[in-house]
Image: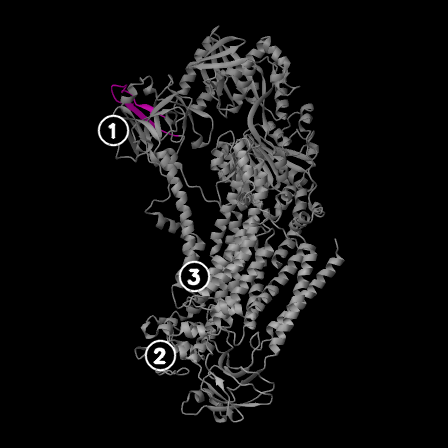
Amino acid sequence: MTDTDQERDRNKETAFYKFTQQTLPACKPVLTPAWVITIFLFTGCIFIPVGLVTLRASRSVVEIVDRYDAECVPEPFRIDKVSYVQDDSIPKNCSRFLKVHKYMKAPIYIYYQLDNYYQNHRRYVKSRSDQQLLHGRKYHGTSSCQPVEFNNDHAIVPCGLVAWSLFNDTFKFIRERAELKVNRKNIAWKSDRDHKFGKKVYPYNFQNGTLIGGGKLNPRIPLSDQEDLIVWMRISALPSFRKLYGRIEEDLDVDDVVVVHLMNNYNTYSFSGKKKLVLSTSSWLGGKNDFLGLAYVFVGSSSLILALVFMLLHLRYRR
Amino acid sequence: MKRYVYINDDESLQELYCDNQISNRKYTVLNFLPKNLWEQFSRFMNQYFLLIACLQLWSLITPVNPASTWGPLIFIFAVSASKEAWDDYNRYLSDKKANEKEVWVVRQGIKKHVQAQDIHVGNIVWLRENDEVPCDLVLIGTSDPQGLCYVETAALDGETDLKTRVIPSACMGIDFELLHKIKGVIECPNPDKDIRRFDANLRLFPPFIDNDVCPLTIKNTILQSCYLRNTEWACGVAVYTGNETKLGMSRGIPEPKLTAMDAMIDKLTGAIFVFQIVVVMVLGIAGNVWKDTEARKQWYVLYPYEGPWYELLVIPLRFELLCSIMIPISIKVSLDLVKSLYAKFIDWDNEMIDQETGIPSHAANTAISEDLGQVEYILTDKTGTLTENRMIFRRCCISGIFYGNESGDALKDVELLNAVAGSSPDVVRFLTVMAICNTVIPVKSKTGAILYKAQSQDEDALVNAAARLHVVYVNKNANILEIRFNGSVIQYEVLETLEFTSDRKRMSVVVKDCQNGKIILLSKGADEAILPYAYAGQQTRTFIEAVEQYAQLGLRTLCLAWRELKEDEYQEWSLMFKEASSTLVDREWRIAEVCQRLEHDFEILGVTAIEDRLQDGVPETIETLRKAGINFWMLTGDKQNTAIQIALSCNFISPEPKGQLLLIDGKTEDEVCRSLERVLLTMRITSSEPKDVAFVVDGWALEIALKHYRKAFTELAILSRTAICCRVTPSQKAQLVELLKSCDYRTLAIGDGGNDVRMIQQADIGVGISGREGLQAARAADYSIGKFRFLKRLILVHGRYSYNRTAFLSQYSFYKSLVICFIQIFFSFISGVSGTSLFNSVSLMAYNVFYTSVPVLVSVLDKDLSEGTIMQHPKILFYCQAGRLLNPSTFAGWFGRSLFHAIVVFVITIHAYAYEKSEMEELSMVALSGCIWLQAFVVALETNSFTILQHLAIWGNLVAFYVINWIFSAVPSSGMYTIMFRLCRQPSYWITMFLIVAAGMGPVLALKYFRYTYRPSKINTLQQAERMGGPILSLGNIEPQPRSVEKEVSPLSITQPKNRNPVYEPLLSDSPNTTRRSFGSGTPFDFFQSQSRLSSSYSRNCKDN
C-alpha cells in the first residue's frame, strides 16, 4: 500500500498525470482594460506607419494605362466591332500615343489588361491538360480539354479552352522614331518553363479547326519557350487582370511620347470586355495598389479610436 | 410449439437444438462490413456525405477532386467501424470466456468436465456452490434433503435476495448416484423471454417412478446467469441453451442514448442544410441566368447552344458540391474523439476514487458526458445511495422500555446489558427472535469465528447485534438451529419458514423448542404488518410511539413478535400450508392467505431500530447541486417516515418554516384524486412564496395517480422541485423517470441496487454506485461512482466542462466550415456564377480535416473557471442547464462571425492581390492562409486557459500549415508548385496577413472586451473575480436567498413526536393552516427571470463575438 502511495506521489509530478487530472499549469489571460487598450494602441501605432510606408511605395510607382479596344476600331466598323475583329481580311493595325508624365525608371513592365474577362469560369479553368503540356502527344488522358480536344481526329497540342483562347494582340513601342528595346524573354515563371511545360513538346494541330479562338503558336518552338502561352495559362482568379507582355529596358523621361503600334486582333467586343495597355514601374510591394496602404491606415486609426473609446469608458465606469 | 427434451439422451437431441454457445456479438467476420456500413448509412449525416461523395464522382459538376470528400469519409467510416469492431471483439472475448468455462456434465453416464458451450439440450449439468448457471436447467437434485436450493437471480431480474428453488416432486428422494442414470422426457414450450413462467411437464422413464406426469413451474428451474448460493451442489437438465435461454431471449441491445447537445447539433445541422439548399437554389438560378445571358457571349468559354437535358441541373449541383463543406465532415469524428476523452477524464479523476475500496469512477457510456452538465432532475435511491447501506443496530424498545436512547447505541446501554445478564425473559425472547427469525446462515470460519451469510443487511445487523448481546446464533444443521446463550446451547427445530414478501411485509418462522417441545411462531416485520395483529389485550401504544420516534430519527424499524402455538393448531395449519405450497395456480397469493391464518394474536415483543448512516458529504452534495438548480426526487422502497427523516437530514427538504411537505395518499381512486388536487392547489397558491415545498407520495397512491390522474400528477411534477416517493417498486421508479422525461427534463437516475437498474436504464443519464448491494446498478449505468458525493464533481466539473467544450467545439466546427464556404460563394460571384472552386482539393481537404481540427481538439483542456470556483458557485451550472452556450442564438453569433471573417478575407485578398498579382493559385493560397491565421486567433481568443498543449496546437498548427504547404510547393507535379515560396518572399503577402488578422479580430476582440467588462455574464464575473483575486460582488444579487442549513433536525423531532395527518405532513408543521399558506418556487422563479435577462445579454455576447 505504501509502495503504491509513494508511486502515486511520484506520478503526481509527471506531466501525464497532470494531464489526466486536468491540472496542467495554465495561463489564464484576462481581458483587462489595460491589456486591451494596450493591444489596440499598439496595433494603431504599428499599422498607421506601416500603412503610410506602403502607401508611399504604391504612390512611387509610375503607371500609364491606356484603354485601346474602342479607339482601335476604325470609325466605319464601330457599329459592328465583332465582325470587324473577326474579319481577317481587314488589317488590325492601330497606333496609340502615350505621354510619359513622370520619369520612369527601367525596367518598365508592359502589361495588357483585360476587364470583364472570366478566366476563372469553371468551364474555362478545367479545360486544360497539365500532363499534356508537359508530356505532349504521348499523353492521352486529355478528356478534361473538351471541347477543344481533337480536331479532325487528331489531338490538339496544347489542348483546351485556355490555350485556344490565347491573347494575340501585339505591341511595338517607338520613342522618337527609334524602337524601344522590349525584352519579351523571362516574362513567364521559371518554374513553369522548367517543370510545367515540356521542352520537347511542340504545338500540333493548334488553331487548325473551323473555330479559331485566339493566337496561333509557332509549331517549331517548344511549349517551354512559348512564354506568352505560359503567361496566359497562369489563370487569373479575378475577372479583371493584367498579364505581363514584356519589359522596356530603357528609362522613360518626362514628356516622352511613346508610340505604340499594335495589332488589335483579340476579340473582347462580343462580351464588351475592355483591353488596356499598361506601362508600369515597380516597387518593393509590386505594382501600383493603394488598397493595402489605405486599409492599414484605416485599421490603424480605427484601433486608435477604439483604444481611446475604451480608455474613456474605463475612466468613466471605473470599478 | 413444444419442445421435448429427452433427459440424458446422448444421441437424439444433439442436432435438433442449438448448443450452449452464447453469442452477444452483433457481427461475424463475414457480415461485419455490409452490416456495419448499413448501420452507419442509416444516419442522416452519413447519407448526406455519401451522396456528396457520389456526386463528386461526376466530373462535369465536381469543383474539386473527389478524393477531398472520399478521403475523410472513408477515414470517418474506418474510425467508427474499428470502434464497433473493437467493442464487438470484446463482446466476443467475454462470450468466449463464458463459453469456455468448464462445467460438470454427465456424458454416457459419467460426470465429465466439459466447456459450457458443449452443453446440449437434455444434458445433466452439475453445479456447485457459487457456480454460475450456464444454461436454463430443470432441477432434478440438490444437496438439500428436501430438494431445495438457493439461487441469486440478480443478473436476471435485478433482485438481490436469494430465491429458493425446489426439485420437482417426481425427483424427490432419488439417490445421488442414480441421478447420473436418470432418463425421462420434459415437455416444455419453445423458448420465450418470460422469466416468471415455465409451464412444463416431466415424465421419468423406468426404473424411476414413471406413472405420473409431474408438472413443472419456474420454481423448478434455475436459469442462466443465476448463481447457486448456500447449496452445496445441485444438478439439473438443460432445457434451453445458448441464445435460446430465457436470458438470451430477453437480451436486447439498449437504445443508444442521445444527448440534448447532440439533438441540438442535429437541429443546427438541419438548419444549415436548409440554408445550404437555399443558397444552392439561389446560386443555381443565378448561374443559369448568367450562363444564358452572359456566358453565351463569352466566346472563349464555348458554351454549346444545345445542352443535354440535365443542363439546368448542372450548375445547381455544382454549387451543392461547393457548399457541401458547410456541414463539416469532421464534426462527428472530432466529437467522438473529445467525448471519449471526457470519459477518460472521468476514469482518471483521482478525486473520484473511492478511498475505502480503491474503485475509481468509470464512464461506461462515453457519449453522454455533456448531458451531465445539463441535468435538471436527479432521481435518487435512498438506501445505499444516500446512505452507506451499512446497517447498525442502534436502539430498541422491549416491552415498553427504551434502550439506547441516551447513548444512541443500545449495545452499550448498561440497562440492556444488565437485563441480558439477568436473563429477563422479555429481553431473552426478544433477542431470540432477533437471532433466529431470519434466513441467515451462520458459517464457521477456520479461526472459529462465526460469519453470517445474510440476504438482507437488516437481518445481518440484527443477528450480529444479538450475538453481541450474548445470544449467539451458532449453527444451522439441516433444520436444527443452535443458539448459545450464557454458556448453554439451546436448540430449535425449524418447522416452517414463512418467507418475506413485499406484500406481506413480514416474515415468520415456526420453530420447535427442542428442550420443552413447544412450538413457537416468531415474526418480524414492518410496524403496519405486525402491530395490528397483536392479541386483543395488548397495549401497543408504546410500540407505536417507539416506531414513530425511531422513524423520525431516520432509523429503520422492525417490530418483533411471537406466539406460542398449540400442537394441533400447528398440525392443522401445516397441512394447509403444504397444500398451498404445492398449488399450481396463484400459489403466492394462497400462501400469503394461509400465512395470514397463523400470523395473528401476536405478543409484541418490541421494536428494533437500525441505523443506516448517511454517506459522507451527502448533505453538502445535495445542497450544492440544488443550488446549481437541480431538482431532487427521492425514490425509495422504504417507509415514509424514514424517508422523510433521511430527506431532512441530508438537506433534501428543509424543516418548517422554510420548507413544507405535502402528502398525497389514499387507498382509493377518489381519495388519491382529492388529495392530489389539494396538493396541486396548494402548490399553485404558494408558488410565489420563497419556500421549499415538496410532496410525498407512496407507492400505492402513486400507482393510482399515474394510472388515472397522469395529467395532474405531471403538472405537480413540473411545479415541485422536490419529491419523495416511498414504497415504490422498481417499475414505478422507471415510470417516474419516464414521466419527467416526457416533460422534456434531463433526468439523472442514481442508485446502487438491482431495483434501481430499470430506472437507471430509463433515465437520460444513469449513475450507479458500486456499493454493497453489488455491481448490477453500476454495470447497467452510464457512469459508476464509488460514493454519492462524487456526483457533485461528476456534474459540476466533468459535466460542465464537457458541455462547455463541446459547445465551443461544435460551433467552431461549423464556423470554420462556413468561413471557407462563404469565401467560395463570394468567389462564385466574380467567376461568372459558374461554380469554380477558389481552393484546390488538397487545401480544402486539409483545411477541414487537419488545419482547423487539430487546434480545436485541444479545447478539451480548456477550463473557463477553476474547479474550486465552480464548487463555490454552483449556480453557474445554469448556463449549461439552460443550454446557454449552444443554442440557435449563439449559433447565429458564430454564423455571423463566419460571414464577417469570410468578407474580411475575401475583400482584402481580392483587393490586395488585384491585377498583375491575381494569379489563381497564389490568390487562393492567400485567402486560405488568411483563414488559417484567423482560425488560430479565434481559437486563441476563445480559449480561457492556455496550457502548453494549447499553445503547441494553436501556434504549432500555424507553423505546420506553412511547413506542409512548403512541402507541397516543392513538388513539381503538384498544382501549387513554388506558390508558397513565392508568397512567403513577398512583403505584400505578410502585410496582407497582418491586415486580415487585425481587421478580422479587432472588432471581435473589441466586442468581447466590451461584453466582458461592461455587460459581463456570470461566468465572466466569476472569471474576473477568480483571476484578479477580487471579491465577487454582483453574483450574490441574483442568487436566491441561500437556504440555511438546518442541523438541529433530530432533536427537534425527538422532542415533538407528532401525529399523522391524512393530507399534510405533520412532521414539518403543526396545523394544516400553516402549511396552506406557504410555498416557494418563488425563489427559483426569480432566479430564472434574472437568469433569462442575463442570458439574452449573454447570447448577444456570443453572437457578437
Residue B468 locus on image (x, y percent): 56, 16
Q: Viewer-proximal residue, B296 or A14?
A: A14
Considering only vertical position in the picture, is A143 above or below B605?
below
Considering only vertical position in the picture, is A67 above or below B575?
below
Q: How many marks?
A: 3
Reply yes or no: does residue B214 show up in magenta.
yes
Which of the labelled discs sits on residue B68, or is there none?
Answer: 3
Residue B769 locus on image (x, y percent): 52, 34
Observer-side mark, 3 or 1, equals 3
Q: First in sequence: mark 3 or mark 1?
A: 1
Q: Mark 2 Cα within 10 Å, few/some/many (few <14, many 20+)?
A: many
Left or right: residue A304 versus residue B65 is right
Q: Identify residue for label 1.
A: B10
Q: Amino acid at mark 1?
A: Asp
Q: Identify residue for label 2.
A: A202
For disc 3, the chain is B
Residue B394 locus on image (x, y percent): 60, 21
SS at mark 2?
A: loop
For disc 2, the chain is A
Which residue corresponds to the image point at 26% horizontal and 35% vertical from the top-left? B16
Q: Residue furthest left?
A: B11
Reply yes or no: does residue B1105 show up in magenta.
no
Observer-side mark, 2 or 3, equals 2
SS at mark 3?
A: helix
Residues drawn in magenta: B197-216
Say yes or no: labels 2 and 3 on the same chain: no
